[in-house]
Amino acid sequence: MKNIIVLTILVIIICAVFPNNSVYCQESGKYEFTVGTQLGFVYGQAIELVYPTDTMGELLSELKWDMKPVFYYGVHLDFSRNDISAGPGFFSSLSFKMGIPSDSGTLENRDWMSTENSALTHFSSHTNRTNEFYWLDAALGATIPVADGIYIKPFLSTSWMRFGFSARDGYGIYARANGSNKYHPIEDDPELKDFTGQTVITYEQNWFIVAAGFGIGTTYPFTIDTSFLISPLVFCTAVDEHLSKGTTYVDFPRWGLFVEQSMRMSFDIKQIILSLDFSYRYITNSKGATYIKSNGGEFFRSRGESGAGLSLMSIGLLARLRL
């Protein structure tokens, strides 16, 4: 990703300082640079998972952190051929989104802790606040015309995302213990807890992804560009703090599957390009080691594994200016 950013910056400098000598800026304006601003929102969830070592179910814990919705603003840079249909070329892009902190739905926390069966043993629901939202994408690839007004674009992409949440208020329903790691049914006179006025859990995810993509587009009567990304190169670091218990979990999920489908519709108005962006991003099956620290002690590695996932739909408006 650093190389792509550096390349984009160098191209900008060359075109700005040496407009008559740059090989990319010659040939009757063969390439163009655009800079723009974007506004939009995402709708979905970040997923936190804990896998068991000795329980009967597939999961020990599942936490779903809502982003329903989170609004964002940001900047977008592009460098590409100004007429994609004229011949093969290359493109690079850089996009940065920053979310507006706000309440964004709920956190639902479920546990299956019984060694007798896979029945639900703990459930809690809290108001979720998205405190941090940073999303950086960079891409580098080629555009290849294949028919009149139609082109394809193979490319590579990297992405970094950081989300931070806090869960407060709400309630809990906990099954009564019935021996060691055994529980009565959760509907059988469970323990009820009220968390009003409390911040119960905080959680953050830091994602880094490298992916290969393929797109197809048309330039008539306006530009419609669709693309698909897929990769197993998924890396995450997550930190979960259970404040009431004084326990911190640090997770390192890796690999899994990342996919993204996106579409952009663009309209030219002289020097301005207006775009409507749609995308859906999904990450699953990312697993790894987890480390635990309780009440100020030392971290130790858990016997079980952690997991992380993401499901986000994004809709945004983008306005770019040709320079």
Image (spheres, helix red, strand yellow):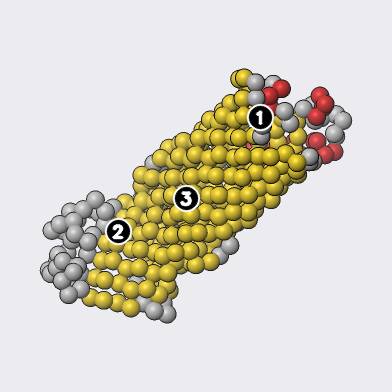
- Secondary element at image label 1: loop
- Secondary element at image label 2: strand
* Residue type beneath disc 1: Tyr
Rendered image: mark on residue 108: none
**Residue at image mark 3:** 312
**Residue at image mark 1:** 220
Name above or below for residue 125 compared with residue 33.
below
Q: Residue at x 63, y 54 (%)?
A: 39
Q: CA distance from mark 2 to mark 3?
A: 21 Å
What residue occupies the far right of the structure in this picture?
Answer: 20
What residue occupies the far front of the structure in this picture?
Answer: 221
Residue 177: percent from left, percent from top: 16, 70
Q: CA distance from mark 1 to mark 2?
A: 50 Å
Q: Residue at x 43, y 60 (%)?
A: 66
Residue 71 appears left or right of 116: right
Q: Residue at x 71, y 22 (%)?
A: 86
Residue 49: percent from left, percent from top: 34, 54
* Residue type beneath disc 3: Leu
Classify 10 Å Cα crowding around label 3: few (below 14), some (14-19), many (20 and above): many
**Residue at image mark 2:** 61
Residue 288: percent from left, percent from top: 36, 48
